[in-house]
Amino acid sequence: MLLPLTGPALAAQDVTRTIAGCTGRFSAEMEHSWLISDDRADALQGERQTFVSLLAAAMQTDHRAILGHRIEVKHAHASLLAVASFSKDTSRARAARLLADGYLDSCRSLILGG
C-alpha cells in the first residue's frame, strides 16, 4: 500500500537535500565575503536567506541528517573558497573559483528569476 508513495517521498527528500546544500554554499560564500571585505556580502546574505526560508518550508522529517548535509556542504564550499582566494597556484585558485561559481549558478537556477 505504501509502495506508490516511495517515489514522491524520495523526490521530496532529494529536493530538500539540494536546498540544504545550496543553503550551505551561500552561507560559506557570505562568510567568506565578510572575511575578504567583498562588496557582494549583502547580496549573498539575501540569497542565503532565500535558501534558508526554502529549507524551512521543505524540511519535513530527518532534520538532523538534512542539517548535517547543509553543514558538510558549507565546509566543502568554504574549502574551495580558501583555495580560490589564498592559493599561490593561480591555475588551482582559478579552477576552485570556477567550480564554486558553478555550484552557485546551479543553486540560483532553482529560484524563479535566478
Image (cartoon, rainbow, N blue to C red):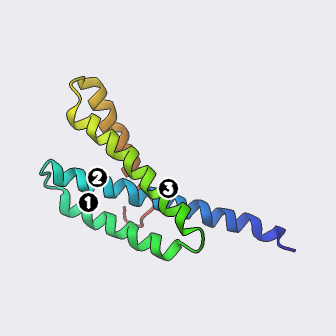
Residue 17 percent coordinates (x, y): 53, 59
- SS assignment at label 3: helix
Name the foreground residue: 66 vs 9: 66
Residue contact between numbered discs 2 and 1, judged by CB atoms under 8 Å: yes
Element assignment for label 1: helix
Of labels 3 and 2, earlier in sequence is 2
Question: Looking at the image, can residue 108 be seen?
Answer: no
Rate crowding at label 3 as few (under 14), some (14 to 19) or many (20 or more) other CA atoms within 10 Å.
some
In the figure, 39 relative to 7: above or below? above
Report if the CB atoms under discs 3 and 1 are less than 8 Å apart. no
**Residue located at (44% from left, 71% from top):** 54
Packing grade of label 2 (10 A; few <14, some 14-19, many >=20) is: many
Please name the residue shown 37% across and 46% down the image: 77
Q: Secondary structure at mark 2?
A: helix
- Label 1 Cα neighbours within 10 Å, binned few <14 / some 14-19 / many ≥20: some
* Residue at the disc numbered 2: 29
User: Callout 3, which amino acid?
Assistant: His
Residue type for callout 2:
Glu
Q: Dot 3 corresponds to which residue?
A: 69
Residue 3 picture location, percent across and down: 83, 68
Q: Which residue corresponds to mark 1?
A: 44
Gap between marks 2 and 1 measured at Cα = 7 Å
